[in-house]
Image (tube, grey):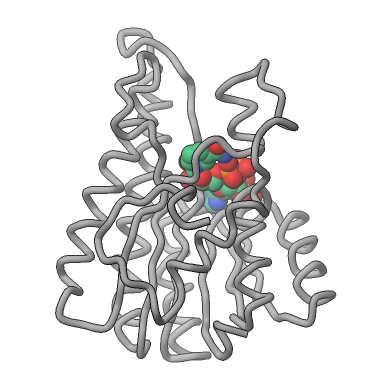
Amino acid sequence: MKLKNKVALVTGASRGIGYAVAKCLAKNGAHIIATARTEGGLVELDDAISDAGGSATLVVMDLLDRPALPRLAAAIQQRWGRLDIMILNAGMLGMLAPIAHLDEAVWDDVLATNLTACFRIIHHLDPLFRQSDAGRAVLVSSGAADAMRPYWGAYAASKAGLESLGKGWAEELVQTPHKVNMLRPGRIATNMIAEAFPGIDKSTLPSPDDIAEAFLQLCLKTCPHQGQVLDATQLT
Ligand SMILES: NC(=O)c1ccc[n+]([C@@H]2O[C@H](COP(=O)([O-])OP(=O)(O)OC[C@H]3O[C@@H](n4cnc5c(N)ncnc54)[C@H](OP(=O)(O)O)[C@@H]3O)[C@@H](O)[C@H]2O)c1
């Protein structure tokens, strides 16, 4: 129970990596605030966490819904007065296409989901994070941020921006006990990887459960990293 009494926000917890990380942190004693749009996925997560003896609060919300975040911040303030762990995981791939053909609406959605929503979460929740005795944040990035892949323009730019945002936030917190790091999961067997590589055999890839431990490492009081971009393989 390495995270006993910790309050942890996990975005994108309805499936894939967020779902597995939420289960892992709950198993280690954290109370999970699980967010996503798909209620069914969150309910399934809640059942899995309860069956393992943990606890969660479900928040069905679209991260692009502007008033939802200040509402969430107010609810966390009222119930716990602090936020110990932030896993900013929710994300979308968008369309893979040459920049000249990329639908502008897709660019807007990818940047809004993968970057602007994370800025807004930090903007609204940083005061609660600072109330923790050892706040830990993990921003979920991707090797695509600097892989120079053709057709990945929007997604790659959103993750490069996310890494810059996280590094800047980490510097703002450098005189505090709080730590912010960026984690690149690698290719993991989720819906998103199947969307990115339609022919891929998911059974050959690590599962989300296989990399959940890497997230746990970055949430512990003993985490030595600050403002770093890490690969999950470095931590598992
Ligand atoms: N899988 C990989 O190989 C891989 C590699 C590198 C990086 N990543 C990153 O890892 C993270 C998780 O990806 P994944 O593979 O687990 O993808 P996934 O299975 O598609 O899950 C994405 C999660 O994000 C949530 N989400 C997306 N848009 C949202 C919105 N507008 N509001 C609220 N929630 C939203 C989804 O929930 P709802 O649809 O229920 O809202 C879902 O829970 C992403 O940031 C991704 O970029 C994944």
Please name the residue shown 64% across and 27% down the image: 194
Displayed quadrant of residue 57: bottom right
The image shows residue 135 at horizontal and vertical percentages of 36, 79
* Above-or-below relation of 147 to 232: above
Q: Is residue 91 visible?
A: no
The image shows residue 6 at horizontal and vertical percentages of 52, 85
* Above-or-below relation of 12 to 219: above
The image shows residue 223 at horizontal and vertical percentages of 38, 73
Picture quarter with ligand 1: top right
Residue nearer the viewer, 54 or 78? 54
Q: Is residue 228 visible?
A: yes
* Above-or-below relation of 36 to 81: above
* Above-or-below relation of 105 to 211: above
Judged left or right of residue 10, residue 155 is left
Please name the residue shown 43% across and 67% down the image: 218
Residue nearer the viewer, 193 or 28? 28
Please name the residue shown 65% across and 35% down the image: 205
